[in-house]
Protein backbone atom coordinates (compact mmCIF):
# COMPACT_ATOMS: atom_id res chain seq x y z
CA UNK A 1 0.00 0.00 0.00
CA UNK A 2 2.86 2.40 0.83
CA UNK A 3 4.47 1.75 -2.55
CA UNK A 4 1.20 2.45 -4.36
CA UNK A 5 0.76 5.79 -2.50
CA UNK A 6 4.39 6.67 -3.25
CA UNK A 7 3.91 5.95 -6.97
CA UNK A 8 0.70 8.00 -7.12
CA UNK A 9 2.37 10.92 -5.32
CA UNK A 10 5.41 10.74 -7.59
CA UNK A 11 3.30 10.63 -10.75
CA UNK A 12 1.23 13.58 -9.52
CA UNK A 13 4.36 15.65 -8.87
CA UNK A 14 5.78 14.76 -12.28
CA UNK A 15 2.56 15.75 -14.05
CA UNK A 16 2.36 19.04 -12.15
CA UNK A 17 5.99 19.90 -12.87
CA UNK A 18 5.62 19.21 -16.60
CA UNK A 19 3.34 22.13 -17.34
CA UNK A 20 4.89 24.73 -19.63
CA UNK A 21 6.82 27.27 -17.60
CA UNK A 22 5.62 30.15 -19.78
CA UNK A 23 2.02 29.41 -18.88
CA UNK A 24 2.58 30.37 -15.27
CA UNK A 25 5.13 33.15 -15.42
CA UNK A 26 2.25 35.57 -15.72
CA UNK A 27 -1.49 34.98 -15.72
CA UNK A 28 -3.62 35.90 -18.73
CA UNK A 29 -6.09 38.75 -18.20
CA UNK A 30 -9.41 38.04 -19.87
CA UNK A 31 -11.28 40.72 -21.79
CA UNK A 32 -9.94 43.93 -23.27
CA UNK A 33 -9.15 45.91 -20.15
CA UNK A 34 -7.30 49.09 -21.12
CA UNK A 35 -4.17 50.16 -19.29
CA UNK A 36 -4.66 53.80 -18.41
CA UNK A 37 -2.30 56.19 -16.67
CA UNK A 38 -1.37 59.84 -16.81
CA UNK A 39 1.45 60.26 -14.31
CA UNK A 40 4.49 62.36 -13.59
CA UNK A 41 8.04 61.15 -14.21
CA UNK A 42 10.79 61.95 -11.74
CA UNK A 43 11.89 64.85 -13.98
CA UNK A 44 8.42 66.42 -13.70
CA UNK A 45 7.22 65.61 -17.22
CA UNK A 46 3.96 63.73 -17.73
CA UNK A 47 3.67 60.33 -19.40
CA UNK A 48 0.29 59.15 -20.64
CA UNK A 49 -0.44 55.53 -21.57
CA UNK A 50 -1.54 56.70 -25.02
CA UNK A 51 1.97 58.11 -25.59
CA UNK A 52 3.18 54.50 -25.74
CA UNK A 53 0.56 53.11 -28.13
CA UNK A 54 2.31 50.88 -30.63
CA UNK A 55 4.64 49.48 -27.96
CA UNK A 56 4.40 46.68 -25.45
CA UNK A 57 4.92 47.79 -21.86
CA UNK A 58 5.91 45.94 -18.72
CA UNK A 59 4.34 47.98 -15.88
CA UNK A 60 5.60 47.23 -12.37
CA UNK A 61 3.90 48.67 -9.27
CA UNK A 62 6.37 49.15 -6.40
CA UNK A 63 7.44 51.19 -3.37
CA UNK A 64 10.84 51.88 -1.80
CA UNK A 65 9.78 50.36 1.55
CA UNK A 66 8.79 47.06 -0.11
CA UNK A 67 11.73 44.63 0.19
CA UNK A 68 10.61 42.29 -2.63
CA UNK A 69 10.10 45.35 -4.87
CA UNK A 70 13.61 46.59 -4.14
CA UNK A 71 15.10 43.11 -4.65
CA UNK A 72 13.67 42.85 -8.17
CA UNK A 73 14.95 46.26 -9.36
CA UNK A 74 18.30 44.86 -10.63
CA UNK A 75 16.50 42.24 -12.70
CA UNK A 76 14.13 44.90 -14.11
CA UNK A 77 17.22 46.98 -14.97
CA UNK A 78 18.71 43.94 -16.74
CA UNK A 79 15.46 43.26 -18.62
CA UNK A 80 15.36 46.90 -19.70
CA UNK A 81 18.95 46.61 -20.96
CA UNK A 82 18.17 43.38 -22.88
CA UNK A 83 15.32 45.11 -24.73
CA UNK A 84 16.84 48.61 -24.82
CA UNK A 85 17.30 48.51 -28.60
CA UNK A 86 13.72 47.38 -29.16
CA UNK A 87 11.50 50.44 -29.60
CA UNK A 88 8.49 48.10 -29.41
CA UNK A 89 9.01 47.34 -25.66
CA UNK A 90 9.33 49.52 -22.55
CA UNK A 91 9.77 48.86 -18.84
CA UNK A 92 7.94 51.28 -16.54
CA UNK A 93 7.71 51.23 -12.75
CA UNK A 94 4.88 53.05 -11.02
CA UNK A 95 5.75 53.99 -7.47
CA UNK A 96 2.72 53.78 -5.22
CA UNK A 97 2.06 56.37 -2.51
CA UNK A 98 5.46 58.04 -2.25
CA UNK A 99 6.75 61.45 -3.24
CA UNK A 100 9.33 62.17 -5.95
CA UNK A 101 11.74 63.30 -3.23
CA UNK A 102 11.54 59.96 -1.40
CA UNK A 103 12.09 58.06 -4.65
CA UNK A 104 15.02 60.26 -5.71
CA UNK A 105 16.61 59.86 -2.27
CA UNK A 106 16.20 56.08 -2.52
CA UNK A 107 17.85 56.02 -5.96
CA UNK A 108 20.74 58.22 -4.83
CA UNK A 109 21.45 55.80 -1.96
CA UNK A 110 20.80 52.50 -3.76
CA UNK A 111 22.01 52.98 -7.28
CA UNK A 112 20.48 53.84 -10.61
CA UNK A 113 17.18 52.70 -12.03
CA UNK A 114 17.57 52.63 -15.80
CA UNK A 115 13.91 52.41 -16.81
CA UNK A 116 11.11 54.96 -16.50
CA UNK A 117 9.74 55.68 -13.02
CA UNK A 118 6.28 57.19 -12.68
CA UNK A 119 4.84 58.60 -9.45
CA UNK A 120 1.34 57.71 -8.24
CA UNK A 121 1.64 59.54 -4.93
CA UNK A 122 -2.12 59.76 -4.35
CA UNK A 123 -2.69 56.16 -5.51
CA UNK A 124 -5.10 57.18 -8.25
CA UNK A 125 -4.77 54.03 -10.36
CA UNK A 126 -7.35 51.99 -8.44
CA UNK A 127 -8.80 50.62 -11.71
CA UNK A 128 -5.69 48.43 -12.06
CA UNK A 129 -6.84 46.39 -9.01
CA UNK A 130 -3.38 46.18 -7.49
CA UNK A 131 -3.83 44.43 -4.16
CA UNK A 132 -0.19 43.76 -3.32
CA UNK A 133 3.17 45.01 -4.44
CA UNK A 134 5.09 44.21 -6.45
CA UNK A 135 2.43 43.59 -9.07
CA UNK A 136 3.42 43.61 -12.72
CA UNK A 137 1.39 43.79 -15.94
CA UNK A 138 2.32 43.16 -19.55
CA UNK A 139 0.44 45.57 -21.83
CA UNK A 140 0.06 45.01 -25.57
CA UNK A 141 0.76 47.50 -28.36
CA UNK A 142 -2.90 48.62 -28.36
CA UNK A 143 -2.91 49.41 -24.63
CA UNK A 144 -4.71 46.25 -23.48
CA UNK A 145 -3.69 44.43 -20.30
CA UNK A 146 -2.53 40.98 -21.41
CA UNK A 147 -0.84 39.40 -18.40
CA UNK A 148 -0.44 39.97 -14.66
CA UNK A 149 1.68 38.58 -11.86
CA UNK A 150 2.28 39.37 -8.20
CA UNK A 151 5.41 39.05 -6.12
CA UNK A 152 9.12 39.32 -6.68
CA UNK A 153 10.35 37.86 -9.98
CA UNK A 154 13.67 37.46 -11.74
CA UNK A 155 12.75 39.53 -14.79
CA UNK A 156 16.12 39.01 -16.45
CA UNK A 157 15.81 35.21 -16.38
CA UNK A 158 15.84 33.29 -19.62
CA UNK A 159 12.23 32.19 -19.00
CA UNK A 160 10.93 35.77 -18.78
CA UNK A 161 13.08 36.92 -21.71
CA UNK A 162 11.68 34.11 -23.89
CA UNK A 163 8.13 34.74 -22.66
CA UNK A 164 8.28 38.48 -23.40
CA UNK A 165 9.92 37.84 -26.78
CA UNK A 166 7.15 35.39 -27.67
CA UNK A 167 4.47 37.96 -26.82
CA UNK A 168 5.99 41.03 -28.47
CA UNK A 169 7.03 39.26 -31.66
CA UNK A 170 3.49 38.17 -32.58
Image (tube, rainbow, N blue to C red):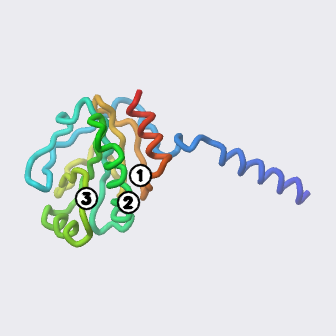
The residue located at (14%, 51%) in the rendering is: 41
Q: Which quadrant, please, contains the N terminus?
A: bottom right
Q: Earlier in the sequence, mark 3 or mark 1?
A: 3
Using the numbered discs, state the Cα–Cα distance from disc 3 to disc 1 in whole angstroms: 14 Å
Q: Which mark is residue 36?
A: none
Q: Which quadrant, please, contains the C terminus?
A: top left
Q: Earlier in the sequence, mark 2 or mark 1?
A: 2
Residue 81's spot in the image, x, y percent?
32, 49
Quarter-of-image position of residue 18: top right
Residue 9's spot in the image, x, y percent?
77, 53
Residue 130's spot in the image, x, y percent?
33, 51
Is 25 or 114 nearer to us in this picture?
114
The residue located at (16%, 65%) in the rendering is: 104
Is there a contact, CB below 8 Å, between mark 2 and mark 1?
yes
Element marked by disc 1? loop
Element marked by disc 2? helix
Dot 1 crowding, Cα within 10 Å, few <14, some 14–19, many 20+: many
Where 167 sits versus 14, above or below? above
**Residue that carries the numbered disc 2 in the rendered image:** 72
Q: Earlier in the sequence, mark 3 or mark 2?
A: 2
**Residue that carries the numbered disc 1 in the rendered image:** 155
Amino acid sequence: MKIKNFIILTLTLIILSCSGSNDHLMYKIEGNKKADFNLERLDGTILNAEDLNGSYILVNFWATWCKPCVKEIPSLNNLHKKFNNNENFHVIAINVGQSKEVIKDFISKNGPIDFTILVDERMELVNWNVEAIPTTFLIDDEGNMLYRTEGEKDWSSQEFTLFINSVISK
